[in-house]
Every structure is written in C-alpha cells, then in structure tokens.
Image: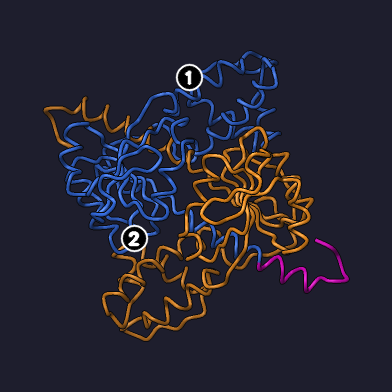
Chain colours: A blue, B orange
Amino acid sequence: MSNLHASIEFKVPEPTLRRLPWYLAYAQLVLKDGEVYLSSTQIAKNIAVDASMVAKDLSYVNIAGKTRVGYDVKELVDILEAFLGFTNSHRAFLFGVGNLGGALLHDNGLEQFGLEIAAGFDVKYELSGTSINRIPIHHIDRFTELQKQTGINIGILTVPVDKAQMVSEIMIAGGIQAIWNFTPFRIRVPENVIVQNTSIYAHLAVMFNRLSVIKECENCKKNKTRI
Amino acid sequence: MSNLHASIEFKVPEPTLRRLPWYLAYAQLVLKDGEVYLSSTQIAKNIAVDASMVAKDLSYVNIAGKTRVGYDVKELVDILEAFLGFTNSHRAFLFGVGNLGGALLHDNGLEQFGLEIAAGFDVKYELSGTSINRIPIHHIDRFTELQKQTGINIGILTVPVDKAQMVSEIMIAGGIQAIWNFTPFRIRVPENVIVQNTSIYAHLAVMFNRLSVIKECENCKKNKTRI
C-alpha cells in the first residue's frame, strides 16, 4: 500500500486489518459452539498470538468488552463483519480469465466476504459471451462501457505477468480505483489507486524452502534427536 | 512460521522468499523482450522497491552479476526458478473440496510453480469418485492409505473454519509435513510442521478499508485538491 497519496492517513494499520479476520473466524466458531462471552485472552490463546496484540487490534473496532467476561460473541461477530466490509456487497470486475482468473470465478466463497464478481474480461474473442459459474465473460473492449453503466471500481488482476502493467493501466483509465493484484508482477500505479498484492505462488516458494530445510535437518540429525 | 522448532535455522528470511518471485517475474518479462543483462538497480526501479533490498535478497541466491552490466537474464531466471522450487515437481493433497478448494483444483497455474495437486479429499460421500479438472476426489477416510502409497507430504487446507483444526490434525497424523492454510483460522500444529497462511479474504478487508477511506477523503476534499 506504499503507493498511496502521502496526505491520506489510514487509521487502521494493514497488519491489524489482516489479523482481524482471524479473530472473526475464531469468534464465529465460538458463537457456533453456543458460547456467550469471549475475551481477548481467550482469542489469543486459541489462535496462538499475543494477547496484548489482540486487545490492541480490537481497540480499532468500536466494541466494548465487559470486565472479567470479555466481549459478547454475537456482537463481536456482527461488529467485526461490518467493520471489515464483509457485510456490504462490493462489486468487482475480473481481468484475465485464465487459470487463476477462472478459478476465482468458481469461488462462491468470495461473496460471503462481501465481494461479488460482476463480470470477467479477457482479450480472447472466443471467451466473449461465455460464462463461468453464471458470471458473464466479455471482451476487454467492453470494459469502459460496462464500468460506466455499473460504476464498479474494484478490479481483480489475473492476467499473465507480461500483460499486468498494461492491463492495470486500462483498468485505471476506465475507472478502477482498487486493484486486487494476483500476479507476481509489481504494478506501478498512480498514488490515488489502491493495490492489494496477493501472490499466492510467492507463498509456495516459502513453503518449498522451509520443507527442504526441514528435510536436510532431518537427514543431518538422523539417529540423534527427532525434530 | 513461528511454530517451527527453535533449533532449525532458516538461512533465507521469509520476506526475501516472498520477494524473489517478484524479481523472477520481472526477469522473465525482460528475457521475453530479448534483453541479455539485467541489473538489480533496473529491477528495483521497474518494480518500485529499494535497490539495496533487491541486491540483498539476491545475495541469498548463488548467482554472480558482472560489474556494470548486471546479471545474465537467462541465468537469473533459471537460477531463481530452481532456487524457489518452481522447477521441481511437488505433489500435494487438497483437503476440503468446497468453493475455494474446488477453485484451486481448477487452477492449472499452480503446476507452473512446481505444485501438482494429486487428489482432493472431502467428507461428502457424494463427491467420492468424482473429479475436478481431472484431479480425483476421494473420501477423507482414504487419505492415510493414499498418503502411504504416494508419500505426499504437502497438504492444502480449504475446509470450513470450524473444521480447520480437526482436519489439520488428521493431515499431520497421516504424514503431512507442510500445510498451506487457506482458511482464516490460525491452526495450532506441532513445532516440526510447516504452516503457510494464505488468507485471501483477509486481503479483501484491507482493500475495502482503504477504498472507504479514500472515498471519505475524496468527499472531504471535494472542490479542494484532487487526490
């Protein structure tokens, strides 16, 4: 989010916004189990994070806990869902109906988190007029027209790496204000455009590396201590 | 990655491992354009990160640049791909063939990054014997048997939040050593199990929040400065 206008102040830090959904997920679980109250200490203990961090993160959310018992679980779930924007419906366009783009169109789970993909765009003419999971696919040439009709300002970027910069420029020129970038390419955007990078493949690199280190370690430690 | 055995030292920091794929993506692009050399300064400038960070990150990779001209692009691409584990084939099982799980099974892009999903598991009996994108789906009861046959030690976790802990325990008991956790639930695992959390929905929360702040800011600044 470094590419944002310096004059805009974001009250809630990005790490907090990324952690709040963990607390929400745990609170939903506790609610399902029929519990009435939940303390930040309990949350911290159960999801293995620091209790003071949970309390600090929750201080950004307008919810008051009761001394000794903690938060009303139902209230906590409702307030967190609303705070995180999961209860509002945000409509988005998806750009690049390839492997990952097509996969995201299949993911109905996004709607539970407030994101509805209204349409997909691609340069391939043979995809125009088709649909995936009942979401229509159009040729990218129709984007500006459909953006004007709908006012949609969120764009999901799932094009190949070598098209990422060019397509993001088309998106911005056509009215997209927030880009959810799934490509491993670091797009350059004007200061007033929001970019959220979600490069799932980069996470794979971390996992592969850790796994190979663990394996080496197991070999070197064989017959000594088991890890 | 905090849940790893304290005695294991990871030479390459996680942030570096997450950034190297950005450099790889850019190098692939430059290679496609027919360039022969690429410097860390050039990478830094084009993907808007700090040049000294690029140089530091690349120092973990065994590649030598030439003074003034930089790295041989082809060599950089090959070495980075191998270093990140994208050229090896890693086989994985997927647990939870719901919305996101089904979507990931559709994503052939994973194979380009070295991950092949060998099978999906679910508790729903009606899914057993079916397949998605030619990947077979089995009942979870068959996991231990198939793990023994294949030795697969990577598991992708895409079950509902309230099943995340229980299913991760089944995975670990059956031989999974690395869990790619797509749920927003923070699973608790033994120290020798690797967890990589990729909660794509948490990224949505950041994007929604930033977008609403920008909107407020636009309203308050209207007729003053355009952001």
Is B148 on the left or on the right of A27, as rendered? right
**Which residue in the rendered view is the most extreme toward the bottom?**
B66
Q: Residue at the left extreme?
A: B223
Chain ID at mark 1: A
In magenta segment, residue B49: no
Query: What amino acid is found at the position of numbered circle 2 in the picture?
Result: Pro
* x and y percentages locating residue A111 in the rendered image: 44, 32
Asked which secondary structure carries label 2, the reply is: loop
A57 w.r.t. B153: above or below: above
**In the image, are marks 2 and 1 on the same chain?**
yes
Give, as a single range, the part of the protein colored magenta. A212-227
Q: Residues within 10 Å of mark 2 (few under 14, many from 20)?
A: some
Categorize mark 1 by other alpha carbons within 10 Å: few (<14), some (14-19), many (20+): few
Comparing labels 2 and 1, the label whose residue is closer to the camera = 2
Instruction: From the top left corner, tell me how far across and down residue B138 is, in percent.
Output: 67, 49
Label placed on residue A62: 1
- Tell me the distance, in whole angstroms, between the alpha carbons under discs 2 and 1: 41 Å
| Local SS, label 1 | loop
Residue B17 in the image: x percent, y percent?
Answer: 52, 63
Instruction: Name the quadrant containing residue A150.
Output: top left
Compare residues B122 and A178 and report the one nearer the observer.
B122
Q: Chain of mark 2?
A: A
Q: Position of residue B18 (x, y in %)?
A: 49, 59
Q: What residue did someone put label 2 on?
A: A160
- Left or right placement of residue A205 versus residue A146 in this view: right
